[in-house]
Image (cartoon, helix red, strand yellow):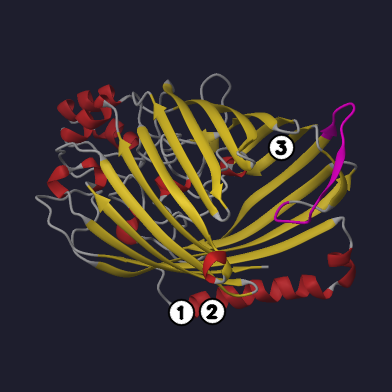
Amino acid sequence: MCKSPSIYLSVILCWAHLFASAQKKENFIQDSSYTCHFQLTVIGQAHSGFKAAYSGQNSLSNSAESGETSITSTLFLGRRLWKGAAFYFDPEISGGAGLSYSLGVAGALNGETYRIGNPSPVASIARAYIQQHIPLAGTAYETEDDDVNEVLDKKAPVRRITITVGKFSMSDFFDNNTYSHDPRTQFMNWSIMSNGAWDYPANTKGYTEGIVAELAEATWSFRMSSVAVPVIANQSAMEYVFGKAHSETAEFEKHFKLHNRPGAIRLLLSHTASRAPSYQQGIVALQNNDTTLLQVISGNAKGKNFGGSKTAICLDIEQEVTNGLSFFARAGWNDGKHASWAFTEIDQTVHAGFSLKGAKWGRKHDVIGLAAVLNGISSDHRNFLKQGGYGFIIGDGSLNYGNEMIIELYYNARLFNSFWLGLDYQFVKNPGYNKDRSGPVHVFGLRGHVEL
């Protein structure tokens, strides 16, 4: 487990040295052809003990856990290539196993941890992609500020086509809710930071390779993607096999004003083809003791056959209500016939919440957030778990089905110009959809975040 302070200190000093070296190059930071940013996030969590009739290999521990810590640290580097084009490169260090190794709750508890991988900090390439803006005829132009993965552009076209090719996270472009999208500063729970029913294509750390094309107008946009999917459920190796292993996503986004206050609505459609077996095949495998296929469903072996299919539809809305107070909500559904393959084991979800800025109590950079989510799974999925099956993130050896309910409350305070400290609480009822292990579970988190 990733608990050694000396490891964290070494990681922090390493990145700080690299970032300071970049800042010393005066022409680097003054030249608008470049962008350089940095983030470091450390999250510690603990949860209470709770009564459970039984436990399985993927269960959340019913004994109290504490001291589980995650760390991510990222350099966001960018370079303008030619008119309207830029290359972005994000090396990242990440580590930490999470509570019960991120198992046992479909709405997993820390968006900065992963199910598998070395719990000690490991360096990797998070993103490496080229992005090209193509202005549309008659477009106006505006200044696009220097930001994370965004090079300063004093003449960025408002109406444009944007094409992105390379390695990235689907969440960089889709389901981008202003108030619930980033576990480094907002909600930590997987099913609140994203739409849990969108089994979005990604490796275990959340990244994939492919292409995204977007048409952007002044008040609306439409984007589509075609990307690689995991070879093994929720693991690192990715593949793109035409007609057999790939994922396509389309999203329409509309911005509007309601009583002169900004809001947005997004409708997302997704289809994924993969090596995922169906849950019906899994039930037959349980009856025949076919451990080979069961290992595929649980994310521990490569499937020999293609044919997995998952279609999803998701809705995302946000609306400013008063100065500083905003409302957001998501709803999502997927067909739930084939095994969850990339994100998490949720087939239906709905959540809603509020975000409140701290200006009313003299802390304009602070934010408090409150949200509740209700997650569910298909009848095929629940029957598979009830008969003793295991997915890649949940499975108690049996199942007395009930919707998984989670409430999350956080307070994020800016203590210094570049440092935020966050407190987080999550209430979990029926973790893993199991009323025989209903809890409730009380989860407490402390988060430090540096952003430069």
Tag 2: amino acid = Leu
Q: Which residue is mark 2?
A: 9
Task: Give the residue displayed 47% in from the left and 30% down from the top.
Answer: 314
Q: Nearer the viewer, residue 262 or 247?
A: 262
Callout 3–callout 1 Cβ contact below 8 Å: no
- The residue at the far left in this view is 53
Where's residue 210, x and y in %? 64, 34
Secondary element under disc 2, as helix, strand or loop, is helix
Q: Residue 22 at what x, y percent from top left?
A: 78, 70
The amino acid type of the residue labelled 1 equals Pro
Residue 13 visible, this orientation: yes
Q: Residue at x 87, y 55 (%)?
A: 33
Q: Is residue 261 above or below residue 445?
A: above
Residue closest to the far front? 259
The residue tagged 1 is: 5
Work out whether mark 3 precedes mark 2 in sequence or the reverse, and give the earlier one. 2
Quadrant into which the C terminus falls: bottom right
Q: Which residues are magenta?
A: 134-149
Residue type marked 3: Val
Residue in view at x 63 percent, y 44 percent: 168
Residue 353 got which mark? none
Q: Nearer the viewer, residue 6 or 138?
A: 138
From the viewer's side, name the closer residue of 357 and 417: 357
Q: Which residue is mark 3?
A: 165
The answer to the question of whether label 2 and label 1 lie on touching residues, with beta carbons closer than 8 A, is yes
